[in-house]
Amino acid sequence: MERKVVIVGIGVAGRVHARALEDVSGVDLVAGIDTSPCNLTFCGNEKPVYTSLFDIVSESRLHPDIVVVATPTRTHAKVCGEIGEYFREASIIVEKPAADNLEDARRIVYDIGGKQPVTVAYHMAFSPVVEWGLEQAAERADELGTPIAVESWGADPYQSDLASVQKSLGNSWIDSGINALSVIERFVKPIERTSLRRLGDPSRSVFEGTFLCEADGNQLSATVMTSWYSTAPSRWTRIRYSSGAELVMDHNAVAGYIRQNGAASAVFGSDGTIPRREAHYRALYRSWLSRKEVFATDTSMRLHQLLLSIED
């Protein structure tokens, strides 16, 4: 029996979810929710779009098994609360980060998540290039050695529409920092944020965060840089190992390589037939729906604490 899906928020992210779900077996997108008039298609069929979750309460055929929350970050807690009120049996998958402050993040992950399944859509952490990197790291563990440092960079060219982006996403740290932390979590365990600082003009939204991590009983540092001041989007993660080898993953290009002893020893890429974000979300849904690999509740909350702590 197919699981019925409702998507709340039919913007860029919501439509990516819809396209990715077309490639996932056992689901049917039955409706969308958005406060603005819009169209929504799924597998070539037009789907109804309502203005609120309450509008579908009386229509039992639309009662969802899964609700995707793809609204602006600052609205996630309110929307997840409404889902808990109207559709307590549904599983929730909420866009990352779960919230832009710790209070709302705890409410979503722990309070609502304690009553019904709640998963944060860490799409980059389950992307094809990350899965490849994990396989390579496991297969070559003896020759690579132990991770000794991690670097991550995320940039978006948002200067031309800064006010709108800020309203929806907050700042580059909130929007991209969670991506970086979720990828790092797949390889090592970040346990403490040691610094966070804004660099340059505030409108450029450039941040540098440093973290203490653990791997194989050892401690190492990770540096995460985010920015909204760039010509084109860029996202990558670099992991250095005790042997001198480097694993580099380009998340935007969906490509990567391992460099050992001054030469490339492994390369990964894609033919580009599947857009980057759709490839990420397809992999995320397969992992989530099969229950093969998801972040535990405590892990998800730890990542949000590392991201949103205001102690610095």
Image (tube, grey):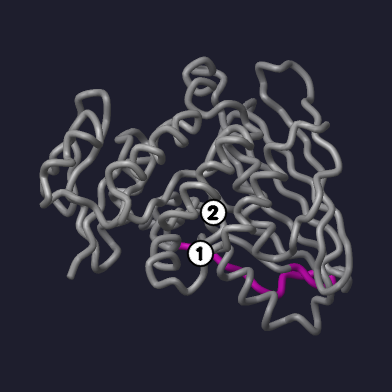
Dominant secondary-structure state across the stretch colored magenta: strand
Amino acid at circle 2: Met
Q: Classify mark 1: residues with Cα within 10 Å, few (<14), some (14-19) or many (20+).
A: many
Q: Position of residue 53 (x, y in %)?
A: 25, 36
Determine which residue is flagged by label 1. Answer: 128
Name the image quarter holding residue 242.
bottom right
Calculate the distance from the C-alpha at mark 1 to the C-alpha at mark 2: 9 Å
Amino acid at circle 1: Pro
Which quadrant is home to the C terminus?
Answer: top right
Q: State left or right for residue 40 relative to residue 292.
A: left
- Residue 82, labelled with which disc? none
Q: Residue at x 59, y 29 (%)?
A: 231
Q: State left or right for residue 81 relative to residue 265.
A: left
Q: Position of residue 118 (x, y in %)?
A: 45, 53
Q: Relative to 277, is 299 above or below? A: below
Look at the image and give the residue range highlighted in magenta.
Answer: 259-270
Name the image quarter holding residue 147.
bottom right
Q: Position of residue 246 (x, y in %)?
A: 78, 65
Q: Name the one closer to the observer, 144 or 29.
A: 29
Q: Residue at x 61, y 35 (%)?
A: 103
Q: Residue at x 46, y 56 (%)?
A: 280
- Secondary structure under tag 1 reads helix
Q: Name the one closer to the observer, 28 or 12.
A: 28
Q: State left or right for residue 280 relative to residue 46.
A: right
Q: Relative to 202, is 289 above or below? A: below
Q: Total of numbered circles in the picture?
A: 2
Q: Residue at x 71, y 17 (%)?
A: 202
Residue 268: within the magenta?
Answer: yes
Which quadrant is home to the N terminus?
Answer: bottom left
Determine which residue is flagged by label 2. Answer: 124
